[in-house]
């Protein structure tokens, strides 16, 4: 019934759909209605149906006064983050206006039925007590969530000179989980594109995102059979980023990163001499480790400092693993966050094994695989 409504709504507004809404291993997604060859258009959405915000560097917080870019269009990572955040704030405002418009013919007023509901398991909507428990497992992630909430409130009040409306957090969660960005020199275009926003992520994609003069399109980049899920890659992110923006994470994520507050910053000469090669996952952090003799040009004092730092970090990891176990035991009904915590626990254990080998190396144990 939802798919029939969705297709009727799309066709009434010039959308071309060769895929249907369904449920698969990734949850709700889009599945091919027919066999398709590489290069065929699966979904085409007119531009005038999208909510679009274009932002130039001059419109954002931008570089500090007196800062000069080396080239006309070179943007720092901080500028890109700032521009992206502001663009998403304005997308949220536009989505709010569209959904609560008095015009019953407004497309987004009807399409809002297909958005995740306000009780969706987005980290941005997580209750304070769950965030407090998650903080024991990953304080960096929780700091990111709380910082975003605070910045959203302050940004809204500054830009629009009005109190935050009750649906703001929910709609912002919808935006940051469903919009995509196109960079053009020193400008960013942020898009909310209906129907395309239901296509799930995979590194093993079968489609790509494309633009034409008057539409946003999903095109196949390999042959697809009827019933195959339509997939494209959002980008390469660590699981913490996937989880906090999209409320999912990947079992075997080659881009995963473990960030531990107060963790070791390994001595480069020592660590490079210890870790000579890396094999890509799966599983996460699978490593080819060779223990060699400590370099003679690194003093015994530095080696001792490094041993102490490693031991402290391993103790920190043990504490975090215990916090993960407690979280999983007490919040097993919170499926999405438990999946993130479970994968983080595995990553912590992999790093503990890695540091255990490094500790042996620093203690002067012999060369071995």
Image: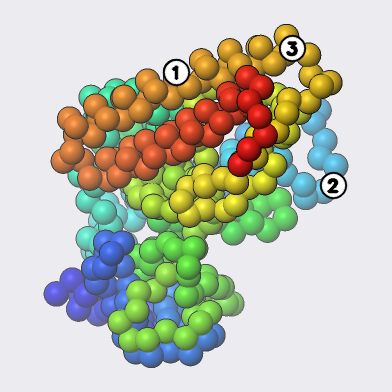
Residues marked 2 and 3 touching at CB (< 8 Å): no
Please state the horizontal and vertical placement of residue 214, each as a whole percent of the image. 54, 76
Q: Is residue 199 left or right of residue 170?
A: right
Please state the horizontal and vertical placement of residue 294, each as a whole percent of the image. 73, 25
Q: Which residue is mark 3?
A: 300
Quick one: label 1 or label 3, which is nearer the N terminus?
3
Q: CA distance from mark 2 to mark 3?
A: 46 Å
Q: Vertical placement of 39 versus 289: above or below?
A: below
Badge 3: residue crowd in 10 Å (few <14, some 14–19, many ≥20): few
What's the residue at 48%, 68% (across, down)?
204
Badge 2: residue crowd in 10 Å (few <14, some 14–19, many ≥20): few
Q: Is residue 197 left or right of residue 335?
A: right
Mark 1 vs mark 3: in front: 3
Say the numbered circle drawn on residue 71. 2
Q: Answer yes or no: is residue 368 visible.
A: yes
Please state the horizontal and vertical placement of residue 268, each as a whole percent of the image. 73, 28
Residues marked 2 and 1 touching at CB (< 8 Å): no
Mark 2 vs mark 1: in front: 1
Asked which quadrant contains residue 148, the reply is: top left
Say the numbered circle drawn on residue 315. 1
Q: Nearer the viewer, residue 292 or 158?
A: 292
Q: Nearer the viewer, residue 15 or 263?
A: 263
What's the residue at 66%, 29% (across, down)?
366
Q: Residue furthest top?
A: 301
Question: How many numbered discs?
Answer: 3
Quick one: label 2 or label 3, which is nearer the N terminus?
2
Q: CA distance from mark 1 to mark 3?
A: 23 Å
Which element type, helix, strand or loop, lies under badge 1? Answer: helix
Which element type, helix, strand or loop, lies under badge 2? Answer: loop
Badge 1: residue crowd in 10 Å (few <14, some 14–19, many ≥20): few
Asked which quadrant contains residue 80, the reply is: top right
């Amino acid at each position: 019934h939802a798919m029939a409504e969705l297709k009727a709504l799309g066709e009434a507004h010039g959308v071309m759909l060769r895929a249907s809404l369904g449920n698969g291993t990734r949850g709700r997604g889009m599945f091919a209605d027919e066999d398709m060859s590489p290069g065929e258009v699966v979904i085409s959405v007119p531009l005038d149906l999208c909510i679009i915000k274009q932002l130039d560097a001059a419109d954002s917080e931008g570089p500090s006064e007196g800062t000069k870019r080396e080239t006309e269009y070179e943007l720092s990572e901080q500028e890109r983050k700032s521009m992206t955040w502001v663009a998403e704030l304005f997308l949220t405002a536009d989505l709010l206006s569209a959904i609560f418009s008095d015009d019953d013919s407004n497309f987004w007023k009807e399409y809002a039925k297909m958005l995740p509901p306000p009780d969706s398991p987005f980290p941005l909507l997580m209750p304070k007590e769950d965030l407090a428990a998650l903080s024991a497992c990953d304080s960096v992630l929780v700091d990111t969530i709380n910082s975003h909430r605070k910045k959203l409130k302050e940004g809204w009040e500054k830009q629009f000179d009005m109190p935050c409306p009750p649906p703001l957090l929910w709609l912002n969660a919808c935006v940051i989980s469903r919009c995509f960005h196109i960079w053009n020199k020193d400008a960013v275009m942020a898009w909310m594109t209906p129907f395309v926003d239901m296509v799930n992520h995979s590194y093993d994609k079968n489609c790509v995102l494309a633009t034409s003069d008057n539409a946003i399109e999903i095109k196949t980049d390999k042959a697809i059979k009827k019933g195959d899920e339509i997939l494209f890659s959002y980008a390469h992110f660590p699981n913490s980023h996937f989880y906090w923006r999209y409320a999912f994470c990947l079992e075997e994520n080659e881009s995963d990163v473990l960030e531990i507050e107060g963790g070791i910053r390994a001595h480069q000469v020592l660590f490079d001499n210890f870790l000579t090669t890396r094999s890509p996952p799966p599983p996460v952090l699978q490593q080819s480790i060779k223990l060699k003799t400590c370099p003679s040009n690194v003093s015994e004092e530095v080696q001792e400092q490094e041993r102490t730092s490693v031991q402290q970090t391993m103790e920190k990891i043990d504490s975090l693993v215990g916090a993960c176990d407690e979280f999983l035991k007490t919040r097993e009904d919170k499926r999405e966050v438990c999946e993130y915590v479970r994968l983080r626990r595995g990553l912590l254990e992999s790093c503990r094994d890695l540091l255990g080998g490094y500790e042996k190396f620093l203690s002067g144990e012999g060369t071995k695989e």
